[in-house]
Amino acid sequence: MKKNIAGILTVLIVIALLLTGFTTKNNVDLSHYILDDVDMQYHVPNKEESLDFTEVKPKYYLFLGKSYVGFKEALGFKESRGDYSTINQFGYLGKYQFASATLQMIGIYNPDLFLNDSRLQEEAFSAYTARNKWILRKDIKRFSGTYINGIKVTESGILAAAHLAGAGNVKKYLRSGGTIGFNDAFGTSIGYYLKKFSGYDTSFILPNKKAKVL
């Protein structure tokens, strides 16, 4: 019994010591925390002041250079500012402004499906470019590196011009030395596309006479 009482007293003493260790005095000397000659002033804006702050978002620019992706994006931006869902006043569709007849040629018969499927539009561009590259393969070999009307002819320029005017019109332009021209409904010429889209790497696209998407 005495042992139990002694044990209880020991526990009570330990608890009392612990409690006294966590007590605080009313007057605490904080002088040793003072930083001499330093003004520590802080201002936390209220709700109204916070509204005056404009969030600055970083700008990111993806540099595609003269790659094939850069070629596609540059041409898509020129055609529609990169808008997959657009239809212009002449009925041309999507980012690359395809005619319905051209889409049917590469296996696409549903314009609504085409407009709502960005991946399908990219595949359509690649297929159509492959067809044009096959049609113009001899002209690409013959005229690349030459100058017509002061413009250096390159493979990518030829393929871009074919997207604008059709491969047949580009053939006529090249083989006539630029005397047989073509302008679309907005007045854009083959020569303009030859220059604007010159020097991109389009080796990724292989010539394919029967290229289709679906």
Image (cartoon, rainbow, N blue to C red):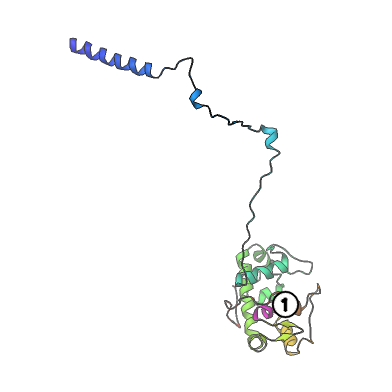
Q: Position of residue 63 (x, y in %)?
A: 62, 65
| Element class at badge 1 | helix
Front residue of 70/24: it is 24
The verdict on residue 85 being magenta is no
By secondary structure, the bulk of the magenta-drawn segment is best described as: helix
Front residue of 158/59: it is 59
Q: Residue, x 65% and y 33% (percent of image)?
A: 45
In the rendered image, which quarter contains the N terminus?
A: top left
Under mark 1, the amino acid is Lys
Magenta part of the chain: 154-165
Q: Position of residue 81 (x, y in %)?
A: 71, 64
Quarter of the figure with residue 155? bottom right
Front residue of 206/110: it is 206
Mark 1 surroundings: few (<14), some (14-19) or many (≥20) residues within 10 A: some
Q: Position of residue 52 (x, y in %)?
A: 71, 39
Q: Residue, x 61% and y 69% (percent of image)?
A: 69
**Residue lying farthest front?**
37
The verdict on residue 161 being magenta is yes
Q: Please name the residue that numbered disc 1 is placed on.
A: 195
In the rendered image, which quarter contains the C terminus?
A: bottom right
Residue 62, visible in the rendered structure: yes
